Amino acid sequence: MNALTISLESVIDLTDEQFFQICRQNSDLRFERNAQGNITIMAPEDGGTGMRSASITADLSIWNRRTKLGFTFGSSTGFKLPNGSDRSPDASWILKERWEALTPEQQAKFAPICPDFVVELMSPSDSLKITQGKMQEYQDNGARLGWLINRHDREVEVYRIGKPKEVLQNPSSLSGEDVLPEFVLSLEEIW
């Protein structure tokens, strides 16, 4: 199944709580909502993409356990971005102080925060243009570092706050730079 986007704005104005409940009641699907209220319905990841996404999240988690600088999140975590979008990056990380500034109630739903670091790993059914738009949205909402990994073309687009994106051709690894100090993701298993 390819992603399907629907607009409900002329029919109903979903509250954040209603959208959260729709996501919980349909847990076999993945939902995102853009700032205009359009809902994108996505099928679960295919096996190859899911395996690679889990590997990225695991490497990030291992690094974070060692450094204790923040918190790592997997692909099923939703965030309410400052522009009103509800997004679920394939892997993400938030600085400890920023996460702990949220109330327990905020942490228990789609947390109203943009991750400091996000990864989108393209699956065969993803649109490059749409995924690039999401990456730009993360950057515009405060993500300090983002990686769009395009396995098909063996490219990585690196998004840094306040800078133009950088496109890397067939890199062997990626650096977490100053956002994730000493974190290096090997792309050997990702390609």
Image (cartoon, helix red, strand yellow):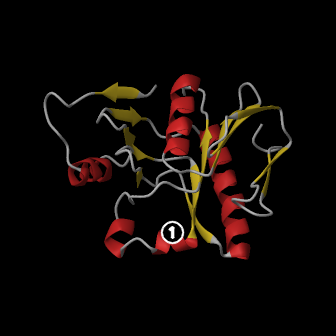
Pinpoint residue 191: horizontal percent, then vertical percent.
78, 36
Q: Number of labelled discs?
A: 1
Q: Is residue 183 left or right of residue 72?
A: right
- Quarter of image, res 104: bottom left
Question: Given the current orientation, which residue lies at the most extreme left position?
Answer: 11
Q: Is residue 134 left or right of residue 153?
A: left
Residue marked by disc 1: 98
Say if 102 sits above or below 14 in the image: below
Residue 29 in sight here = no
What's the residue at 36%, 49% (across, down)? 27
- Quarter of image, res 172: top right
Pinpoint residue 97: horizontal percent, then vertical percent.
54, 73
What's the residue at 21%, 50% (across, down)? 18
Question: Given the current orientation, which residue lies at the most extreme right position?
Answer: 172
Which of 132 and 49 lies nearest the eye of the viewer? 132
Pinpoint residue 114: horizontal percent, then vertical percent.
48, 54
Name the amino acid type tagged 1. Answer: Arg
Category of crowding for the residue at label 1, using alpha-carbon neighbours closer than 10 angstroms: few (below 14), some (14–19), many (at least 20):
some
Q: Secondary structure at mark 1?
A: helix
